Structure formats: C-alpha cells, structure tokens
Image (spheres, rainbow, N blue to C red):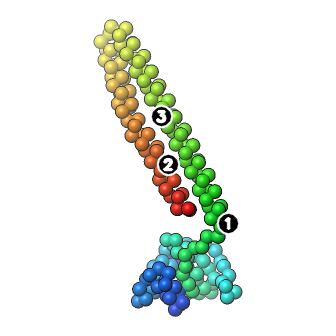
Amino acid sequence: MKSDVQVTKHARERAEQRFGIPRKQTGKWLRQKFSRATHISDIIGDDGNEARLFVVDGILLVVDKAEDRIITVMTPNWTKETCGKMRNFARQEITKEKTKERRRLNALTRLQAEIEIEIGELRLRLLKTRSLPKKLAIQGRIKALKMRLEELPQEEHIIKRKRVVAVQSLARVW
C-alpha cells in the first residue's frame, strides 16, 4: 500500500469522532493505517458510488474506487445474523479444542500408565537378574522412565493452556 494516499475532510472528522485521534494527527494516522490495511472487497456506498473496503486493526477504511483517497473510517457493525453465525462458529471451534485437549490428555494418561507398567516390569527383572551389566542397564532405563514421568505434568499444563488460548481468542466474538 502507498502511504501517499489522500484523506478527505470527512475521513478526518470521523477519525477524530470515532477513534479520538487529535485533529492534527488524523491524516498521518489514517495514512499509517492504510499502509498496513488489507483489501476486503469492493463496495457501493450509501451515495451509490463504488469504493474499496480495507481493514486494519479492527478498523474499516473506505477508499475511493478510482484513486487512493480515504473517504471515511469506521468500526465494523455486526448484524444479528452475522453475530449468530460467528458465535456458532466460535462454539464449534471451542468444542473442537476441548475434544483435542481431551484426546491429548487421554494419550498422556495412557503414556503415564505404560511407563509405570514398564517400570514395574523392569523392577521385577532387576530382582531376577544376576549380571551386573544387565542390572546397571535396567537401573538406567528405570531412571530414564522416571525422568519422563516427571515431565508429564508440564506437558499436561501446556495442553491445557493451548485450549485456553484458543478459547480466549474465540471469546472475542461475544
């Protein structure tokens, strides 16, 4: 995007009214926003003129179709229908995250049980083994498995945090 975009008086007034930008800084602020904005769609304004719609940081910029001139600036409006669809989408995604978390935690619980069983079997072998090198190898394996068991609570925390982060970002819809 170009930063030499023109800014209409109307856009400056709206930036001041809607976003609290001091009048002297509105032009610079709008140009900076436009330089990072993403084109969403071509639209038709209330006056019937064609324009381009851009979004950046939750701010909508309406730009003239023919030239780079910011006509107005606003926040997105949600209709009831759009809001309902977004909430349904968020609920579905939250359910998916819960399912992923449950699967990962179940796998972790299974791993913990398998490690504990292997440790028990190794202890039994250790009691039956007479060879010193074999005993040392078994003791080393038991130690490694115990270290792995100690790592599992942190992995469980990471799994739970992944879901929390996803849910927090999806909560933005409400």
Residue located at (62% from left, 79% from top): 52
Whether pointer 1 and pointer 3 mark residues with C-beta atoms closer than 8 Å, the reply is no
Mark 2, Cα crowd under 10 Å, few <14 / some 14-19 / many 20+, is: some
State whether residue 4 appears in this view. no
Q: CA distance from mark 3 to mark 2?
A: 16 Å
Determine whether, in the image, residue 96 is placed left or right of residue 36. right
Residue type of the residue flagged with mark 1: Glu
**Residue 83 locus on image (x, y percent):** 62, 65
**Residue 172 locus on image (x, y percent):** 52, 62
Return the residue found at the far bottom: 9
Mark 3, Cα crowd under 10 Å, few <14 / some 14-19 / many 20+, is: some
Q: Earlier in the sequence, mark 3 or mark 2?
A: 3
State whether residue 86 appears in this view. yes
Dot 3 falls on a residue whose secondary structure is helix
Frontmost residue, 15 versus 78: 78
Residue located at (48% from left, 32% from top): 109
Q: Nearer the viewer, mark 1 or mark 3?
A: 1
Q: Earlier in the sequence, mark 2 or mark 1?
A: 1
Residue topped by disc 1: 81
Q: CA distance from mark 1 to mark 3?
A: 41 Å
Residue topped by disc 3: 108
Residue topped by disc 2: 163
Q: Is residue 92 above or below residue 25?
A: above
Dot 2 falls on a residue whose secondary structure is helix
Residue type of the residue flagged with mark 3: Leu
Residue type of the residue flagged with mark 2: Arg
Dot 1 falls on a residue whose secondary structure is helix
